[in-house]
């Protein structure tokens, strides 16, 4: 007997197949690829479809129109496209989420309960992004142009800034524990994890690879919360001398305030 989770994942694969063929056979679209967890080959049962679609320039003025930057709605033309595979329950535009400058529409489908993030980009502005899975390409899109390498000074400044923001968040997060604001604690803890990732990347001369749900574990007890906060502070303290050697700057004794606040628990 197929489990509900397996059946849900199977529906998603069927939708992906249907979507790919529908778009491939439509003259308005010249390429499409998957980003996100599917693009990296790391999808789970809960993954959505992060779908980039390249619109031929002759059709992009209509399909990539932005009468608003964000809203719990989309244009009739885009809604008609999204509805070709299944009736949407909800569709909302958040165009800033399209890295290529096109449109972004979150669509939740009524019958299957599946989610597709539709990103439509005019052909003249499109190139394939890294960590993506090509579904079809009728025109031979180029890869993303390589970014200009950071100078040592830029890397040092990026690392230094992230160190500073980390300790600001660490101080505030100790205060969250004092106040019993556990939701805020876990949210800010995730920010702190991201600061550590950013510092490590800057030290290596790399850009951080975006991932969702950077740290999804919930620390249930006060002891676990304090231990997690302290372990993350230890990790950052070990990185700080490397930041200085790179030519950056770090605060003096930032841990003191954190520990004084934790001592009040």
Image: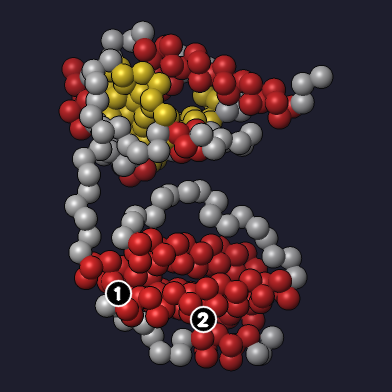
Circle on res. 171: 2
Colour mapping used in the image: secondary structure
Query: Label 2's element?
Result: helix
How crowded pointer 2 is (Cα within 10 Å; few <14, some 14-19, many 20+) is rated as some
* Position above or below: 132 against 2: below
From the top left corner, tell me how far across and down residue 231 is, in percent: 60, 74
* Position above or below: 257 against 186: below
From the top left corner, tell me how far across and down residue 78 is, in percent: 36, 23
Looking at the rendering, which quadrant does residue 25 occupy? Answer: top left
Query: Distance between the Cα atoms at labels 1 and 2?
Result: 25 Å
Circle on res. 246: 1
182 relative position to 48: left or right: right
185 relative position to 236: left or right: right
Indicate the quadrant containing the C terminus: top left, top right, bottom left or bottom right: bottom right
Residue at the location (52% across, 73% down)? Answer: 235
Circle on res. 133: none
């Amino acid at each position: 007997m197929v489990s509900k989770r397996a059946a849900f994942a199977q529906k998603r694969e069927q939708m992906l197949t249907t979507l790919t063929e529908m778009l491939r056979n439509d003259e308005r679209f010249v390429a499409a690829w998957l980003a996100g967890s599917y693009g990296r080959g790391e999808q789970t049962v809960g993954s959505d479809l992060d779908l980039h679609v390249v619109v031929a320039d002759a059709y992009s003025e209509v399909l990539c129109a932005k009468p608003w930057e964000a809203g719990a709605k989309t244009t009739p033309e885009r809604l008609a496209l999204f509805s070709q595979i299944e009736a949407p329950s909800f569709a909302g535009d958040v165009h800033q989420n399209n890295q290529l400058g096109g449109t972004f529409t979150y669509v939740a489908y009524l019958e299957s309960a599946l989610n597709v993030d539709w990103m439509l980009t005019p052909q003249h502005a499109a190139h394939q992004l890294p960590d993506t899975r090509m579904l079809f390409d009728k025109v031979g899109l180029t890869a993303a142009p390589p970014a200009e390498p950071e100078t040592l000074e830029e890397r040092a400044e990026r690392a230094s800034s992230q160190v500073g923001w980390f300790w600001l968040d660490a101080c505030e997060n100790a205060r969250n524990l004092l106040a019993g604001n556990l939701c805020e604690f876990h949210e800010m803890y995730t920010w702190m994890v991201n600061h550590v990732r950013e510092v490590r990347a800057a030290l290596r001369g790399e850009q951080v690879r975006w991932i969702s749900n950077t740290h999804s574990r919930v620390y249930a007890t006060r002891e676990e919360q304090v231990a997690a906060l302290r372990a993350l502070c230890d990790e950052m303290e070990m990185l700080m001398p490397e930041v200085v050697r790179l030519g950056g700057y770090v605060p003096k004794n930032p841990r003191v305030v954190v520990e004084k606040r934790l001592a009040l628990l």
